[in-house]
């Protein structure tokens, strides 16, 4: 469907649903959002916010039980949502997600959030090749698969918004997070390049890169979902989910909730803003120091380390 036909189709669909017309960048009601990693944490916060704004939301996650629970909760609250079990590391699984999203309400997605991710905190020499490959497949290829599946449609319709979840670890690093940080640096680079490429062609598709600091989520226990061919789920996790709050509070008194992240994300989408740093005030000076050290060819030191992550990794 070309952009002109899609605009007419979208206007008719919105009219039929009783949705008032408005600016595409700020009017979310009635539009379709697809969010990966949506069963918990930041992903669920985004799904809940999108639903509250009147969006029709497709929640995607690899955890069936958690996904069913999250979807049931939003449906109970009267929201229009659908669930699709998705392994973002699988190209075919993400293609299936795109097909299901198109079919769910007969309206193609307007917002796509590639949010699913995993982390295995470990010093590099203590890490395993299996965990490294798993982290890269989920974090990096998960974003790539999502972009290949959804971005061409957004571009052809010349409408919508793409958000890729990176991390503050994509801008600052600390010992104990080598592979995770590498994937998040890659996501930031990929997202920025595509932003520039679309801008060159005058595309109306918005792109944002989300770089969260510390958020109350299940990221530290993501090895619960590690597939069998990479060693299977871990038991006896070093930082159980129920104890995650204590080290986080010691490291940063202003740990934020997924709902607070979601508020920032949707405000950035309204503004068509690329960078979304959830803890800008906390990290800005460290980011400047790191950039200055790079430009001056000064060796990395304590002034440019991710001091928050370093406190508990």
Image (tube, grey):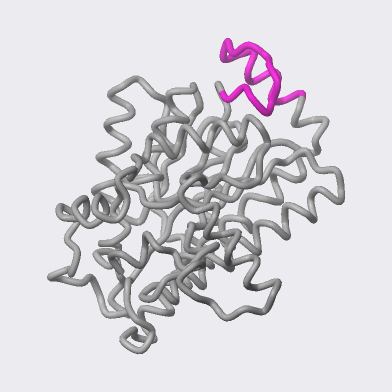
Judge by depth and name the residue closer to the eye, 112 or 12: 112
Q: Residue at x 30, y 54 (%)?
A: 63
Outermost residue toward the left? 236
Q: How many marks?
A: 0
Q: Is residue 27 one of those drawn in magenta?
A: yes
Q: Is residue 177 above or below residue 149?
A: below
Q: Is residue 277 above or below residue 301?
A: above
Judge by depth and name the residue closer to the eye, 155 or 173: 173
Residue 225: x %, y % from top left = 28, 64
Which stretch did the figure color magenta? 8-28
Residue 295: x %, y % from top left = 70, 71
Left of 204 or right of it: where is 276? left
Left of 252 or right of it: where is 246? left
Judge by depth and name the residue closer to the eye, 101 or 79: 79
Quadrant of the frame with the C terminus = bottom left
Residue 23: x %, y % from top left = 70, 21
Quadrant of the frame with the N terminus = top right
Outermost residue toward the right? 201
Q: Residue at x 53, y 49 (%)?
A: 210
| Quadrant of the rendered image containing residue 87 | bottom left
Q: Residue at x 35, y 20 (%)?
A: 78
Residue 25: x %, y % from top left = 67, 28
Q: Is residue 117 above or below residue 48?
A: below
Q: Is residue 71 above or below residue 246?
A: above
Q: Residue at x 27, y 53 (%)?
A: 248
């Amino acid at each position: 469907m070309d952009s002109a036909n899609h605009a007419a189709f979208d206007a008719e669909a919105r009219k039929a649903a009783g949705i008032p017309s408005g600016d595409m960048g700020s009017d979310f009601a009635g539009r379709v959002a697809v969010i990966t990693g949506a069963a918990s944490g930041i992903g669920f916060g985004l799904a809940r916010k999108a639903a509250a704004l009147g969006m029709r939301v497709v929640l995607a996650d690899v955890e069936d039980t958690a996904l069913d629970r999250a979807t049931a909760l939003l449906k109970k609250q009267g929201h229009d949502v659908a669930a699709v079990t998705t392994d973002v590391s699988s190209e075919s699984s993400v293609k299936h997600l795109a097909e299901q999203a198109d079919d769910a309400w007969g309206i193609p997605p307007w917002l796509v959030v590639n949010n699913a991710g995993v982390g295995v905190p470990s010093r590099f020499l203590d890490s395993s090749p299996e965990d490294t490959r798993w982290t890269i497949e989920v974090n990096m290829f998960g974003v790539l698969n999502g972009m290949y599946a959804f971005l061409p449609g957004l571009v052809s319709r010349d409408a919508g918004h793409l958000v890729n979840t990176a991390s503050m670890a994509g801008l600052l690093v600390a010992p104990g997070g080598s592979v995770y940080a590498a994937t998040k640096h890659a996501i930031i680079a990929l997202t920025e390049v595509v932003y520039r490429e679309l801008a060159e062609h005058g595309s109306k598709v918005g792109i944002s890169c989300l770089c969260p600091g510390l958020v109350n989520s299940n990221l530290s226990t993501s090895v619960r979902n590690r597939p069998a061919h990479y060693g299977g789920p871990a038991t006896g996790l070093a930082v159980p989910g129920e104890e995650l709050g204590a080290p986080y509070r010691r490291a940063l008194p202003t740990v934020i909730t997924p709902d607070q992240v979601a508020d920032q994300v949707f405000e950035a989408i309204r503004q068509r803003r690329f960078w979304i740093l959830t803890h800008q005030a906390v990290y800005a000076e460290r980011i400047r120091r790191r950039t200055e050290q790079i430009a001056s060819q000064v060796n990395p030191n304590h002034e440019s380390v991710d001091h928050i992550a370093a406190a508990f990794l």
